[in-house]
Each structure stands twice: as structure tokens, then as C-alpha cells.
Image: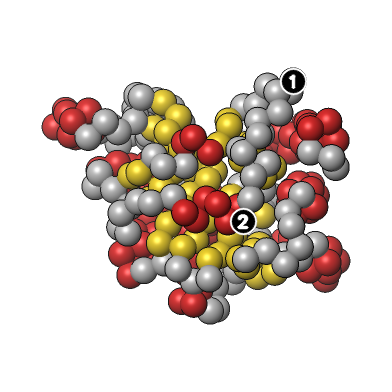
Amino acid sequence: MNLVYSYVTGKAIYIDTMLLMASLLPQDPPYDFVVLLDEKLDTWWNRRRLRRAGLTPYRLPYRTQWDRWFNKFRVFEYIGVEAYDKILYLDSDILANLPLESLFAVDFPKDHLCVVHEVDDPTGDYWSLDDQPYSDDELVFLERHGLGGFNAGTMLLHQNTAMRRHFADILEFAREYLASGKTALTDQPFVNYHFNRLAAVNYGLTPHVRLWPEHDEAYPDRLIHFLGGPGDAKRKYQEMRKYARRFMNQ
């Protein structure tokens, strides 16, 4: 058995994007789908809406303010996670124009994170932290292994001790960084740093995902990721609805 999960935080409209995603998935799928909920969105009404859509809501215990950006790496706190073989993470602004179970067939090393390659340069603003640049030796290492920047909105991983340790290390890295008084806008630089420096990255999801979709293309057999910042929620939801009506019979 495999697990699909998302993490919903910030604006309530991301509950709507989750429900739109779920409306295009088959009933009784061969995987479980869990939605990790930010404390502020963990209301009776939101839980009811998610359950009616076939999704399982799970509230993450609130700890500190920075959790809101990094709770996606706390999936191993979900009760019963040990029962699954592979775990697929999806951002809440994605439409699935393919059976999600087909993604679990992607083969990759058990201690690697399977993701979508986005840029060749790993040092850009969205994939690294200005005050913690890669060393010259690390850049040579990354080039030797063909590693660049990857998108953290879709991630496929094995449920095992190695991945538990990876995610725990990312959370600790972020906790120490933010506790020092620094700020970070997203989780993406942290997960890029961690897996790139270990050369524990696999780009096996790249052929299955379309980032920044063109609105006039159907993209069969793809995950379609409507990217944008936290403030773009309303715009993304509207684009997703239009796209689903036009190309996905919704």
C-alpha cells in the first residue's frame, strides 16, 4: 500500500484547491490520501469537506511559527505511516491528469528523493540561501553528479529509516536557521541543500510533471502544477478551475 499526502496552510482557499484536485481523482483508489492540516485550518467544517471528498485530514501538533513553512516534512508523524511502502507528496495547487498510482512505479534508490528537475543552476534565489552559499568544492561535486535545482512541490520517497532521518535533518536545519534570527520565504532551499549535498536526488518525476502550464495545452499523463507565491492563491484557484473545465471534464 502507498500513501499520497498534501499539506495545507495559510489561506482557506487552499482547501478549495485540494477539493478541486480530489474531484478529478478516482473513487476507491489503490492508495490512501492524507491532508496534513495547519492548526488554523483544522476546523470541523474543513475536516468534513475533506472527508466527503475521500481525503483523510490529519492535524499536525502546533509547535512554533516556522512550522507553517516546513510541516510538509513531518509526514512521518502521521499515525500508521509505517504501513506504507512509498509516499508521494503533492502541493495543493496541482491537478492530476494521470492516475496517481502510476507514479509509484517510478524506480529510484531507496535513500534518494525523487523530484522534478527545474533548473541547472543550484545557486539561484529559489534554490539556495544567500548567506549559506555552496563552496567551490560543493559546486564541483554537484556538477560532477549532474545536479541543479529541483522543485519541492512534488516529491516521491520510500517509507524507510533513511528518509525519516533525511526529513528530520531538514527540520533541524530549518529550526536552527530560523532560531538564529534569519528569515526564509520557503522550504525549497533547505530541501535542495540537504539532498544535493548528499547527491541523494533522483529526477524520475520530471517527465510526469508540467510546471507553469500553458492554458491552451491539455498535458495528458501529467501532474499540472500551477505555481506561484502564497499571495497568488485566488489567481491559481481560478486558473485551475478554468483548466479543469476545459481539459479535464470538471
x and y percentages locating residue 123 in the rendered image: 34, 27
Q: Residue at x 29, y 41 (%)?
A: 196
Image quadrant containing the C terminus:
top right
The kind of secondary structure element at disc 2 is: strand
Q: Nearer the viewer, residue 171 or 54?
A: 54
Q: CA distance from mark 1 to mark 2?
A: 28 Å
Compared across the picture, whether 160 is left or right of 249 comes to left
Q: Nearer the viewer, residue 74 or 133?
A: 74
x and y percentages locating residue 2 in the rendered image: 53, 66
Q: Residue at x 49, y 56 (%)?
A: 104
Q: Nearer the viewer, residue 8 or 120?
A: 120
x and y percentages locating residue 155 in the rendered image: 48, 49
Task: Judge whether residue 68 can be spotted in this image.
Answer: no
Residue that label 1 marks:
216
Residue that label 2 marks:
7
Decide: is 197 above or below 168.
above
Local packing at callout 1 (Cα closer than 10 Å; few below 14, some 14-19, many 20+) is few
Compared across the picture, whether 141 is left or right of 72 comes to left
Q: Residue at x 49, y 35 (%)?
A: 207
Q: Image quadrant of residue 143?
A: top left
Instruction: Determine contact: label 1, label 2, CB under 8 Å.
Output: no
Q: Amino acid at mark 1?
A: Asp
The numbered mark, 1 or 2, whose residue comes first in the sequence reads 2
Q: Amino acid at mark 2?
A: Tyr
The kind of secondary structure element at disc 1 is: loop
Q: Image quadrant of residue 56?
A: bottom right
Query: Which numbered disc covers residue 95?
Result: none
